[in-house]
């Protein structure tokens, strides 16, 4: 698989991508682009594309105000049966949950614009959306716990500021929707540590998720 390449304009809109990038574009890519535009710094993240493959996504501001994105396959991941098995289960559960969340949100937006729904039905749609989001977080936790049990730690040098920003941009839209405020304090110097990047992100995400409940 060749590297994915994409270009985004200064408003975060996709302007060009090659075939490999189009196959791998995701909400995580949009968050990295948004982060690079707002901070003026390069941002990276590893994501799972399915139960056996992972990508390293790197978004970097360019001199003309655009953002360049490169997606590189991560090779040599541990070939663990239980992790693959659980990833497949999680993948099969996550897709219908994502559809439920998307269609419920669309219904709420359409009916709100047309004033064609009574408050009780609107509340029911909100409940369905929130419960589907809660189940999605539960599914992610299952995969997280499985990795702790079956996959060795992937230690690397991690910039703590990058991790904090990554988690912040995962939750900033949700915080706005729930009329809450997320605030981060940027240290004057970068703090580097040896850690498993994905597990560190997950741990901080759990803290932020709980604080928004």
Image (cartoon, rainbow, N blue to C red):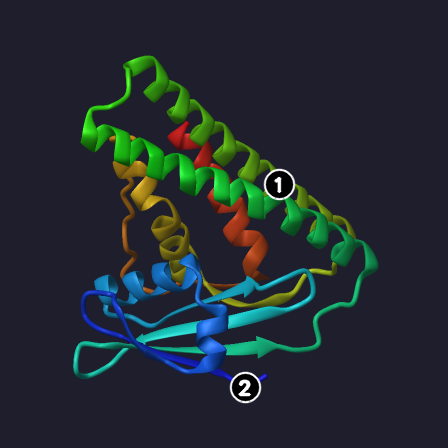
Residue visible at 27% across and 43% down? 183
Direction from residue 90 to residue 188 in the image, left or right = left
Res. 180 in view = no
Q: In x, y percent, where is residue 125? A: 39, 25
Residue visible at 23% across and 69% down? 40
Residue 190 found in image quarter? bottom left
Residue 211 found in image quarter? top left
Q: Residues within 10 Å of mark 1 (few under 14, many from 20)?
A: some
| Quadrant of the image containing the N terminus | bottom right
Q: Is residue 126 above or below residue 3?
A: above
Q: Is residue 34 above or below residue 77?
A: above
Mark number, residue 115: none
The residue identified by callout 2 is 2
Residue visible at 58% across and 77% down? 73
Q: Residues within 10 Å of mark 2 (few under 14, many from 20)?
A: few
Q: Is residue 24 above or below residue 124?
A: below
The Cα–Cα distance between marks 1 and 2, rounded to whole angstroms, is: 30 Å
Give whichever of 173, 88 is nearer the camera. 88
The residue identified by callout 1 is 139
Q: In x, y percent, where is residue 84? A: 75, 58
């Amino acid at each position: 698989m060749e590297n994915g390449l994409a270009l985004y304009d200064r408003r975060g809109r996709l302007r060009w991508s090659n075939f490999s990038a189009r196959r791998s574009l995701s909400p995580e890519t949009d968050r990295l682009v948004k982060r690079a535009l707002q901070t003026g710094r390069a941002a990276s993240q590893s994501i799972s594309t399915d139960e056996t493959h992972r990508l390293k996504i790197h978004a970097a501001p360019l001199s003309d105000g655009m953002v360049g994105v490169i997606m590189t396959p991560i090779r040599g991941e541990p070939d663990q049966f239980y992790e693959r098995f659980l990833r497949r289960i999680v993948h099969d559960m996550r897709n219908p949950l994502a559809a439920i969340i998307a269609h419920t949100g669309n219904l709420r937006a359409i009916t709100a614009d047309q004033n064609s729904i009574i408050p009780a039905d609107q509340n029911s749609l909100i409940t369905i959306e929130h419960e589907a989001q809660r189940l999605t977080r539960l599914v992610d936790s299952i995969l997280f716990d499985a990795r702790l049990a079956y996959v060795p730690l992937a230690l690397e040098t991690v910039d703590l500021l990058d991790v904090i920003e990554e988690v912040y941009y995962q939750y900033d839209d949700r915080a706005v929707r729930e009329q809450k405020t997320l605030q981060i304090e940027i240290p004057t110097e970068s703090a580097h540590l040896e850690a498993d990047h994905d597990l560190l992100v997950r741990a901080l995400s759990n803290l932020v998720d709980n604080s928004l409940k």
